[in-house]
Image (cartoon, rainbow, N blue to C red):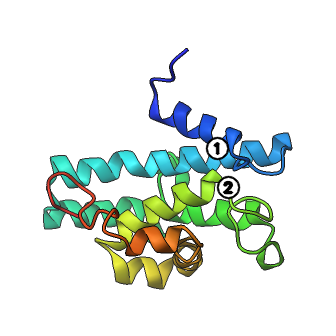
Amino acid sequence: AALPQSNAILRHLARQHALYGDGSLRQAADVDVLLEAVESLRLPYVGLIYREQLAEAAKAAYVSMHLDRATADLSRNGGAHFAYLEQYLEASSGGEEAGGWAVGKQATVADFAVYEVVDLHLRIFPEQIKKDYARLAAHHAMVAGLSGVREYLASPRCLAQVNNNKLG
């Protein structure tokens, strides 16, 4: 049967290519949580880019709700906050001795999802992300430096403009 949903395709490919953790239910759950956390940030990001067109007032409201550490009360915004993403990444990664990966001791699909959502936000809020979310910024740099990823990012196949409306 065909897989019509992009997140189902993503998870299927991750399982097929051993990018879902060490095979334990715990690591698979951590990967799923991070994929959902990224998705919870992607939805308001899409609104900021396409509905709000990066208007200054909308950007300020977005920062307040999703980036400002002072508003990291996750009961208010359903976990759609960079502080939640960073805290979960720190808790599930096993620390520096595990290599800094999002889940366990090797790259998973969660690393690529976290990379992508951080990358989108670095395009709009680079100073704030680097200052307030150093762990996420370091993780972003680590994934960007992976063999294959590094070459892709330097190639003409990599899209310089990621949004169809040329914002962000």
Residue designated by label 2: 108
Question: Residue 45: x, y in percent?
Answer: 32, 53
* Element under disc 2: loop
Answer above or below: position of 130 versus 151: below
Answer above or below: position of 14 versus 67: above
- Of the numbered discs 2 and 1, the one sitting upstream in the chain is 1
Q: How far apart in space, not on screen, are marks 2 and 1 (Cα)?
A: 7 Å
Q: Is residue 73 visible?
A: no
Answer above or below: position of 45 versus 142: above
Question: Residue 109: x, y in percent?
Answer: 62, 52
| Contact between labelled residues 1 and 2, with CB atoms less than 8 Å apart | yes
Q: Is residue 143 visible?
A: yes
Q: Give the residue displayed 36% in from the left and 45% down from the top.
A: 43
- Closer to us: 160 or 54: 160
Q: How busy is the neighbourhood of tag 2: few (under 14 within 10 Å), some, or many (20 plus)?
A: many
Q: Give the residue displayed 47% in from the left and 52% down from the top.
A: 80
Question: Residue 85: x, y in percent?
Answer: 57, 60
- Closer to us: 24 or 161: 161
Q: Give the residue displayed 46% in from the left and 46% down from the top.
A: 40
Amino acid type assigned to the residue bearing label 1 in the image: Ala
Report whether 161 appears left or right of 134: left
Amino acid type assigned to the residue bearing label 2 in the image: Thr
Q: Quadrant of the C terminus?
A: bottom left
Question: Residue 18: x, y in percent?
Answer: 74, 47
Q: Quadrant of the N terminus?
A: top right
Residue designated by label 1: 14
Q: Give the residue displayed 71% in from the left and 73% down from the top.
A: 100
